[in-house]
Image (spheres, helix red, strand yellow):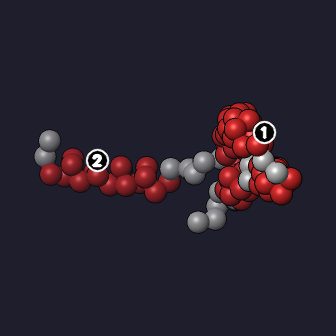
Amino acid sequence: MTWPQADVKLASSRFWIQTDPRMSPRLKKLIGTLVIFIWLPVYILFAWAIGLHVLPSANGVTAFLYYALAGTLWIIPIGLMLPWMYRDASRN
């Protein structure tokens, strides 16, 4: 391959990199939905296993704290993912 051909190939690869479309909103929502459907059962099983070990010997305050934390901690990863799912593809 001669130098001009290599330059054309490099320029065309730059062109494709620059015009490569970002992830579509539809694909982002699909990925986010799949992550949610995988995350929730995993979290439920994890919280259930922790609860089986902690709650039988726990007093009322410990049980209350466990239920308060287990009932709200699942939303943190989903809350961090939702802005990504709904972010406009044209924004940086």
Q: Residue at x 58, y 66 (%)?
A: 92
Q: CA distance from mark 1 to mark 2?
A: 68 Å
Residue 24 in view: yes
Give the quarter of the figure containing the N terminus. Answer: top left
Q: Residue at x 70, y 38 (%)?
A: 53
Amino acid type, residue under disc 1 in the picture: Pro
Vertical order, 74 against 33 (above or below): below
Residue 40's quadrant in the figure? top right
Instruction: Name the residue furthest left.
Output: 2
Q: Which mark is residue 83?
A: none
Task: Verify CB contact (< 8 Å) between mark 1 and mark 2.
Answer: no
Q: Nearer the viewer, residue 56 or 39?
A: 56
Q: Position of residue 29 (x, y in %)?
A: 72, 44
Q: Secondary structure at mark 1?
A: helix
- Report crowding for label 2: few under 14, some 14 to 19, many 20 or more residues within 10 A (C-alpha): few
Q: Residue at x 46, y 57 (%)?
A: 18
Q: Position of residue 58 (x, y in %)?
A: 78, 47
Identify the residue under disc 2.
9
Instruction: Name the residue furthest bottom.
Output: 92
- Report crowding for label 1: few under 14, some 14 to 19, many 20 or more residues within 10 A (C-alpha): few
Q: Secondary structure at mark 2?
A: helix
Q: Which mark is residue 56?
A: 1
Q: Residue at x 86, y 53 (%)?
A: 60
Q: Nearer the viewer, residue 4 or 23?
A: 23
